Amino acid sequence: MTSEKTVLITGTSSGIGLAAALGAARAGWTVIATMRDTGKAGVLLRAADENGVADRVQVKRLDVVDPESVTACLQEVIAEHGRLDALVNNAGAAGVGTIEQSSLDDVRATMEVNFFGVVTTTRAALPHLRASGGRIITVSSVGGVVGQPFNEAYCAAKFAVEGFMESLAPVAATVGVGVTVVEPGAVASEFVANLGLDIPALLAEAGPYAPALQAYLSRTQDSFANAQSPAEAAAPIIAALTDERPPFRIQTSPWAREFSATKLADLDGSAVQDLTRAWVR
């Protein structure tokens, strides 16, 4: 067991999760770096060694859509470290498509990973975080604030995450647990690459939506050409871990703040609709 603060981070095999694990370790945390497939841990472990924090990073298997996996991982953490001081909900999966051409199974799978995975892990961690007066930090997205074309299921899941955490935050505060959501914009990571999109096939199958999809994909490819690095996007997570009183909502870049502000000041929805319509024409 240890008196050092311990953080569990989901989805650490690449991207923001990997960068957050390294950043937290450099900040002095004991990091439980979890992933569904621990066979993908090599990149993280090599980076931890190169950064001189290998002794602070411990890889464990955790699949957010498997409650037994979540429970087993947390039991191991408490048995080995005696405490859990923070949970970073980062694991997620992107999805591109529109509802008429997506199966309900596809939609449910997106919700399962991006929303119910967060709910499952948060629920299991809360007793331990109450004991330590800890924190829940959840990686949402600007897609959890502004609905985006061809991302109905993904944005629905992220909207649900935002509503869940916004509702939980005042309740958790009564038992000493802080809650923060972090909203990245475009990030140059494997998150989008892992979609494995066959763009010609997507367009061929899009039927009447093909012109709109082509416009959306062109705009999205341009935005990712100027994306944040995973380390830049992870920096606010580390700040939320270490600041005395982090805010509830943090955007990871000036662009993300401006983009989210469009929605938060848009009482009748017209500003968002004007913005996103331009993406598909």
Image (tube, rainbow, N blue to C red):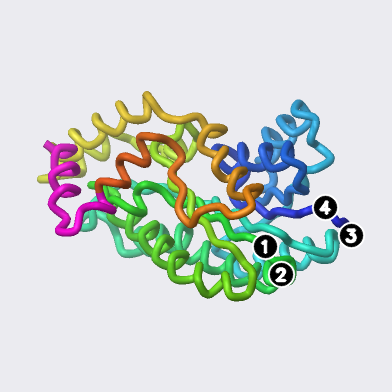
Quadrant of the frame with the C terminus? top left
**SS of the residue under disc 2:** helix
Task: Answer few, some or many: residues within 10 Å of disc 1's Cα (few below 14, many 20 plus, some between 14 and 19).
Answer: many
Residue indicated by mark 2? 128
Based on the picture, tell me whether residue 273 belongs to the magenta stretch: yes
- For the residue pair 100 and 171, the one nearer the viewer reads as 171
Q: Which region is colored magenta?
A: 263-281
Q: Quadrant of residue 210?
A: top left
Q: Amino acid at mark 4?
A: Glu
Instruction: Say which mark, if any, is on residue 4.
Output: 4
Picture disc at residue 152 = none
Residue 134 marker = 1
Identify the element where label 1 is drawn. Answer: loop
Q: Nearer the viewer, residue 8 or 116?
A: 8
Give me the C-alpha separation between circle 3 and circle 1: 17 Å
What type is the residue that disc 2 sits on?
Answer: His
Name which quarter of the figure residue 46 lies in. top right
Residue sitting at 84 percent across and 65 percent down? 79
Q: Residue at x 64, y 69 (%)?
A: 176
What's the CA distance linking mark 2 and mark 3? Answer: 15 Å
